[in-house]
Image (cartoon, rainbow, N blue to C red):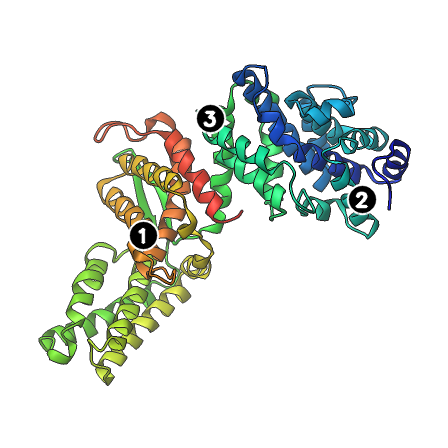
Amino acid sequence: MTDFSNHDERRAWLEKQSREICVAMANRAAMRVFPMAVLPTKAKDAQRLDLTGATKWALLISAVAAYSATAEIKASASAASVASASASASALASASAASVTSVASAAAFSASAAASAVASTAASAVATAASAASDAAAIDQGTTAPELLALPLWPDENPLLEDWQKTRKILESDAVDQSFWINWYERFLHGQPQNWEMLQEIALTVKKDDWEKGSAHVNGMIADIQAKYLRKSTPLAEKVEINPLTNRLHIVPERMSQKTLYQNALEKVRDDMDYFRDGGFKNAHSALENVFTRILDRTFEKYRNSPQRVHDDFVLARNRILRLIEAGELADDDEVRDFMQVLETGALDIRGAIKAVDAAVGIRERKRWQELSDAQRVRIENANEEVAKASDPDMAEEIRTDVSDALDKELVDSDGNTDPIAIDAQHRTSSRLPRAYQALKKNGKKAAVGVGGGYSIGEIALGVTELFGLFGL
């Protein structure tokens, strides 16, 4: 095993490695001491945070360069460099924001020989030498640069854990939202999966000129990219667009390839509902009346032309009936079972007729809404309220109802199981928020002028970032 405390051994080992390995080693060394780059020193806090922006950018680019180096990434990394590649070991050990930035950004665009020098400098710091040796041992066992980047930063106990906890509080208290960067760093810290395709797009999209416009501007650019990836992960059989008649957001259902099949499913459920109603809801079936009035009547009155919502309500009604049977409040007879089968078949027919509905149903259990902090809940709620302000009345009502159900803690039982009402509302919220954000950004200041006043695109962007974090994208 290479003695990384020895300059000659360390340098000799690194000079045998590929450029990507050297960049990954330098990036991980700088990432380990990043928390210390944010902590206040004798310098003013504002100056410290100014340097932190460049540091985060350099760390992100150098990680992407190690994962998948391209000519474009090398060019971006070169632009990110704010200091020479000769940052000293003592400078990195003290972890000033400038020195961490120097190591990360210089490594990203250096040729192999220069990259090994940067990696050697980074690895020599007292705080990172042992972990760099652990990285080297993994590489000697065949670990590639991308695989190395997927490992926790510290193989054993994190000696800078307290510094990171302090750093996180500083970032959380910043006037500009830092949640993307906090989540991004903690994924590296703990070896959790990263969305490398998205990180590469961020690295190529955000330029030096953008950072000079401030963190709020950069966060908006990142939110644009996050919204695109969030849309891919939250399919829904509808579009959110600007209504040309009102200049406000509205929902446009997905076009149906098998409209007749969809209409037949609706009519079959309606016919069976009429059968029970005509019978006066005899005592054994009286509990069905509540399911009809609270779920299915609403479906036919308000959402008949929205196949996604009809599907969700059919499934919801079927599950409600099953619960009533299990609780002994509804007769478990052939008539009730036949109606449950009609609902289930109807939902399956809709999924078969409209592929976007099928895709949406398939990914609903990925979300981790129960883990949201109170602050995150407030951001999501505020973001949806801003969308509601920019929407037509019907969509605004749906947005407000869904976010209320999505965040309702009473819809989670003592075992942590989430009520289907909340699950469906959470999925619609996750899907509609990024779509609304993109529609409003595309339309610019033309949207939502007039009734209800304006809206805050910044608040909506914060909500997109919080939802993005739920999916581990």
**Which amino acid lies under the numbered mark 1 shown in the image of this protein?**
Lys
**Which amino acid lies under the numbered mark 3 shown in the image of this protein?**
Asp
**Which amino acid lies under the numbered mark 2 shown in the image of this protein?**
Ala
Looking at the image, residue 391 lies above or below residue 369:
above
Distance between the Cα atoms at labels 2 and 3?
A: 36 Å
Residue at the (48%, 44%) spot, across then down: 469
Nearer to the camera, 427 or 148? 148
Left or right? Give the position of 313 relative to 430: left
Using the image, tell me which numbered label, if any, was put on residue 409. Answer: 1
Looking at the image, residue 390 lies above or below residue 425:
above
- Residue 64 falls in which quadrant of the image? top right
Circle 2 — which element? helix
Using the image, tell me which numbered label, if any, was put on residue 136. Answer: 2
Residues packed near mark 1 inside 10 Å, few (<14), some (14 to 19) or many (20 plus): some
Residue at the (33%, 58%) spot, across then down: 412
**Image location of residue 249, percent across then percent down:** 31, 38
- Residue 117 falls in which quadrant of the image? top right
Left or right? Give the position of 264 relative to 156: left
Looking at the image, residue 396 lies above or below residue 329:
above
Residue at the (87%, 34%) spot, across then down: 6
Whichever of labels 1 and 2 marks the residue nearer the N terminus, that label is 2
Residue topped by disc 3: 174
